[in-house]
Amino acid sequence: MWIGNAVSNYGFQFTAVAVPVEMFALTGDSFWVGLLGVSALVPLLIFGVWGGALADAVDRRKLLIVSSLVAWVATLGFLVHALAGWENRWLLLVFSAVQSIGFGVSGPTRTAIIPRLVPAALVPAANTLSFTTIQAGMVLGPLTAGVIFAGWDVHVALVVAYAADALLFTAGLWAALRLPPIPPGEPGRTAGLRSITDGFRYIAGAPVLWLSFAVDIVAMVIALPRALFPEVADERFGGGAAVGWLFSAIAIGSVLGGLTSGWIGRVRRQGLALVAAVVAWGVLVALAGFAHQLWLIVLLLALAGAADLVSAVFRQSILLVYAPDEMRGRLQGVMNVVVTGGPRLGDLRAGAMAAAWGVGVSWVGGGLLAAALAVGLALFFPALTRYRTPDPDPGPETTSQREPISSGP
């Protein structure tokens, strides 16, 4: 599963770069690039939460296979659009929405599987490995895409990028097929409205969880400058490979942070560390907005990415350790909405602010505001900063603690 996810995620980064580049090439407007995030947000809100409920009610392996295929269909749509030479911005929005449906279900399902595969004591390490691998793909993928866009005409580069993503996706499908059946921990549960409501009720009664969601929303919605990358690359650095460096910069720092993250598992005050990491993220993003040298922007965004990796691992570990297995799918669905929906709202925020007041105000102002809001949340709602991880249990979970995975054929 780890290998398959690593390869397929690397391939997806080609599309993650190509779609905003294509939209900016068609419109010349960062606002339309930001609308890509909006087109993905609505289906993500619906299918992300419902997908989490499904992950608690059906075999997670089967659900992962079906939802991954839906996302693959959207990638093929981007490929056909590029091959046919169409220049339809609305189709790009539609394909982004379909892709979001697939990711909305597969995301929480894939993560909810992890505690069924490793002992509870190794969940932080497994999360760190997973996040680091994902970020490695987000480094290599955009850099490779940058080489493609620097070496070919934009229309040819789009076809190559989408085709590579469609091909590499098969590794993720292979990984899902190799999993044994993973039945729900609570047989007989349905994925209806009541099940979803139970998940939100659980979160409402757990301040540590909803506060961890809130600080992530602040970090991504207010500070993420991703929608500005095509415009900045084009206007400041002449396009080409620069766009690949900008899209990969945050992930570069996340990979380096993951490779030096052995200390994360030893931190007991994970809530306080999460808030500190979000504040560092906002400040570093703001500093990157002041820079006009490509190497300096990449460096500062990489440092921000390291802070983001730390916050992501703590946030995910708090959720997976705090929640019982029969709730993990639904809570992971909400988390998936926050983690993937926040950046999409951030794209809209960045694009709209850039259209109104310019790239500088959008980039720098967002970073500083996010840092200030994170501090404010920590001061007014101290439950998160007071949270301490339970005493570590080095042994694996017993059968009585966790529903065993049934044997495959």
Image (cartoon, rainbow, N blue to C red):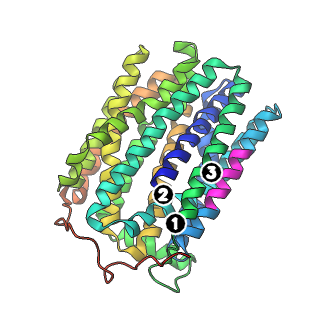
Quadrant into which the C terminus falls: bottom right
SS class, disc 3: helix
Locate residue 267, reporting x and y percent: 18, 52
Amino acid type for the residue under numbered disc 1: Leu
- The answer to whether residue 159 is seen in the rendering is yes
For label 2, the residue is 1
Locate residue 210, reporting x and y percent: 36, 61
Residue 206 lies in what quarter of the image?
A: bottom left
SS class, disc 1: loop
Judge left or right: residue 329 versus residue 381. right
Residue at the (45%, 51%) spot, across then down: 339
Residue 113 lies in what quarter of the image?
A: bottom left
Q: Which mark is residue 179?
A: 1
Q: Earlier in the sequence, mark 2 or mark 3?
A: 2
For label 3, the residue is 170
SS class, disc 2: loop
Locate residue 231, reporting x and y percent: 57, 22
In the rendered view, tell whether residue 16 sits above or below residue 314. above
Query: Residue 171 or 381: which is nearer the viewer?
Result: 171
Residue at the (24%, 43%) spot, across then down: 276
Judge left or right: residue 136 versus residue 34. left
How many discs mark residues in the rendered view?
Answer: 3
Badge 2 vs badge 1, beta-carbon distance below 8 Å: yes
Residue 315 lies in what quarter of the image?
A: bottom left
In the rendered view, tell whether residue 37 sits above or below residue 351. below
